[in-house]
Image (spheres, grey):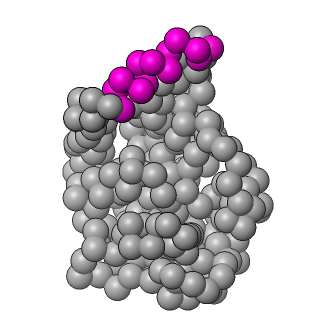
Amino acid sequence: MRDHNKAFCRLVAETFDGPGPVYEFGSYQVEGQEGYANLRAMFAGRDYVGCDMRPGPGVDRVEDVTAINLPDQSAGTVLCIETFEHVFEVRRAFDEVYRILKPGGMFVITSPLNFRIHGYPDDYWRMTPSCLRRMLEPYEVRVTGYQGHRAFPHTVMGIALKTPAPADALARCSRLVASYREWCRETERSMPAVEKFRRLAAQVYRSKGERRQLADYYAAEFHVDRGPIPAAA
């Protein structure tokens, strides 16, 4: 789990009243991330179940996100933070999450795009921002977007609210987008001087594309949708 994904999840939890129970798929905390990748404190006061394909740190229940052993409409909030790139039957996983969410439930997802292959235990997919936007279209209200250079961002992310969405859902979505952009700006501003110098020096020997990736690392853009996506989108 990378810092910006954890920040996005925290801001979602602060902006929306994510109902319980909370199910996290991909909760296995890999070596070096024990504790850091624990999202439970963000959803205090709600039942929280960490699920993964294998037992281990952070896992309460072994589950396959493409064939979840839960009844329809039984989960309040589902988290898939840097998970779906590791799921071969990824379309089935989207369908299963929708199936188990209660009416008014919330789905939070992040996934890498411009990022190295990382097998936990394997790595299959990269979703573009447009792909994620389409995948979440069955939900009533969605926020989808990316962080990084617009031609090849390093991360896509989104939240989706199943019908019936709260009356103030669009206002909360706008607040989330503003909060996340502010987090990006503040994180870039507060970068240690050594890191700023390292990134500046790297410009000398990087290609034009790599320089753009570095320069736009903290850029973030989002769509807020309610109802069908416009045909030209």
Q: Nearer the viewer, residue 162 or 190?
A: 190
What x and y, as percent, mark residue 129? Answer: 56, 36
Check if residue 203 falls in the magenta segment. yes
What x and y, as percent, mark residue 184? Answer: 31, 36
Check if residue 43 falls in the magenta segment. no
Which residue sits at x=56%, y=70%? 30
Q: With 37 as the anchor, is 151 left or right in this view?
A: right
Using the rendered image of the protein, determine whether residue 222 is visible from the camera's viewpoint: yes
What x and y, as percent, mark residue 166? Answer: 28, 58
Q: Which quadrant would the C terminus be assigned to in this image?
A: top right
Start-end of magenta stretch: 195-207
Dominant SS of magenta comes to helix
Residue 66 quadrant: bottom right
Above or below, comparing residue 9 to residue 115 in the picture:
below
Q: Nearer the viewer, residue 112 or 46?
A: 112
Residue 49 quadrant: bottom left
